[in-house]
Image: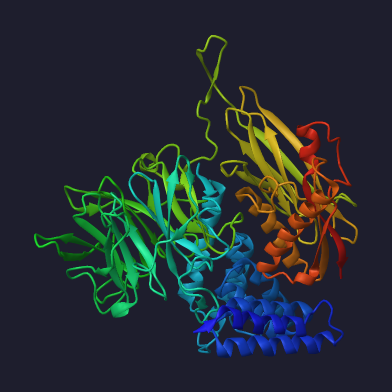
Amino acid sequence: MTSIRSVLIFLTFISAFFNPCYSQQDPKETARQYMEQAELIMAETKAMDDAREIMVTAADLDTTYIQANYEAGRMHLVTVGKDRAVKYLLRVYRQDPDFRFDIEYWIGRSYQFGESFDEALVFYRKYKDKLTKKSNYQGKDKVDMATVDRGIFECENGKEFISKPGNFSIVNIGREINSEFEDYAPVLNENENEIVFTSRRREDNLNQNVYDDNKPYEDIFTSKKVGNAWTYAKNIGPVVNNPYHDSNLALSADGNTLFLFKDDGGGDIFFTKRQPGGEFGPPVPLPGSINSSYEEKSVTISQDEKTLYFSSNRPGGFGGLDIYRATKDSKGEWSNVKNLGPKINTDNDDDGPFIDYDGVTLYFSSKGRKGMGGFDVFKATLDLKSSTWSEPVNLGYPINTPDDDIYIVFSKDGKRAYYSSVREDGMGYTDIYLITIPEGIKNIDNVAKLPVDEPTNPTETDSVGKKDTKTLKPLRYIITVVDAANKASLDAKVRMQGSSDNIIVPVQVQGKGVFAFTVTSDKPKDYRLSVEVSGYVFFNQNIKIEGASATEKTINRTIEMRKLSVGVSSILRNIYFDFDKASFQTESYSELNKLEAMLVQNSRMVVEIAGHTDAIGSNDYNQQLSLKRAQAVKDYLTKKGIDPRRIQPVGYGKTRPLASNDDEEGGRELNRRVEFKVLQNQ
């Protein structure tokens, strides 16, 4: 074990000694020194995140350094920011397309993670053509044909799913639960007033040392809901957690039995019972024949606690992890273990089962079937008469993504679900999200084809409250993205979604820089429109759009994107702080992550982060508060791996108002803001 402090001192020393923005050494030589340090870290530890950041620095310092750029891309693909690998792998490919036999495949893989399916298909097919022509190639850098065909299949599925996003609201459950580290595997009781989950956060962790990847150990945390709000999560305690890895698996409907995973016996299932005082007792192995010398990785239990589903890689399955079922016998032990068969299991991994409160609807995740990448969540129903399962249905986009989507649990009425995911409004690595499904997911025959933003009342209402039989026609909101200077059309990443519910509005690309959104809500609604173009200031704005009506209507809008030239500034309007504090509200993280992504894409850019306040309070107090808020933005960015010397925080207090401070709305509210300004970009 290595202490957090000693590892951080080591890495801080490296960062201070080799700083790419300010080093007076030859950039190519400095890049090589960086790579030596990254290779040393990987030789001594498994701290891939730390090594990745150093490799990225080396690659950005010398874009012709092929090995550094390849490793920067590869490390992104095996950690986080998988879509960012494209930048580095393309540098390799353009300079030496023969550097690795499988380079086209990994470029395609990164594009797939970024939901750029057409670009991914181009590179997958390039690699497939190469593999066809050299079918006898047996090098270690070969990806087999079945794997690349699977990638092509997933991209075609992804294009289909994203064109028909589901009517799902997916919202970050909040800072009371999530942290800057991994938070995942949420389980809840039937009343949804208690949540248990696994976290690798430093705060309240039982072990102050780190695992060999330089991250804290897994601990189990819990939170209670008071009213409509979750209390701040706390460690479940040393009776359940030990000083090393601990993770939860399931919680019984009454909340009195908690199932855990431990490394014993290759990976076994344990359980603990709630004691009279409300705390959980010492975990013990699951009785019966479920645990084996192989891995038992996940579990879910029926509401009556007589049937249990779990995953295992034991022999006799269909391949990888399979899902099994067991029943409780008269002695209280689990027996009669049966594989669910080929209707559920595939030759890939099938994991993360959740049996619904009805006892017949099973949700699970699979790397097989009609997915769009990694684990996708599916649902199937058991016919009690024939004891057969229905054909599993993919839950669709945006629940499923090209990355892993797994360990989902549902509410009793089927209208809410909880799972962990990596999304653009996340606070760190994986966060826990609340999915709201107004129709109830069990009532949807084909989840993946559910239209988005469906009107709750698809007819007009007259003055006396009677329904008009006219069908409301969707509103078309057409965005054209151009360069602010020369008005040239720009390829862009454009998204529009509900400001409060994150429900995605379907979009069609109608040509270079032209995006047509279809708004079907029957009432005016607030949306968040975001536009991103590499090398330009990102655009992120809240807008109100009127609802669908009896007549067709089209709104055209042009978004002018500004290049990231020295002196350009922009207001970060969607960063929100607690009143009179420098702590972020949950709604701020989407904007913060877009700022971080822009800094990653433009690795030589240096920015000023400026905090501003309204006129309430003294000059000194407002200046200090504005500086603290600017510093909070810097701290967030540096924790995400941005070089701290690229960010200069400053507080202007109330000295630079945008509007009058005489009123709140349109005045003081506008003056309370954070801005960034480009100081250097070369």
x and y percent of residue 493 in the render? 69, 54
Q: Considering depth in this image, is 272 or 49 the residue closer to the camera?
A: 272
Vertical placement of residue 522 versus 477, above or below = above
Q: Residue at x 55, y 60 (%)?
A: 179
Q: Residue furthest left?
A: 330
Q: Is residue 590 left or right of residue 239?
A: right
Query: Quadrant location of residue 366?
Result: bottom left
Quarter-of-image position of residue 114:
bottom right
Spot occupied by residue 330 in the image (x, y as percentages of width and height)? 9, 59
Residue 69 showing in the rendered view: no
Q: Position of residue 216 (x, y in %)?
A: 51, 73
Residue 235 visible in the snapshot? yes
Say which quarter of the image contains residue 671.
top right
Q: Colour scheme in the image?
A: rainbow
Residue 584: x and y in percent read 65, 52
Toward the top, the furthest residue is: 464
Q: Nearer the viewer, residue 367 or 78?
A: 78
Across the whole image, how many numbered discs are drawn on residues?
A: 0
Is 99 in front, or is 183?
Answer: 183
**The C terminus sits in image quarter:** bottom right
Q: Residue at x 27, y 72 (%)?
A: 317
Determine whether, in the image, residue 500 is placed left or right of residue 681.
Answer: left
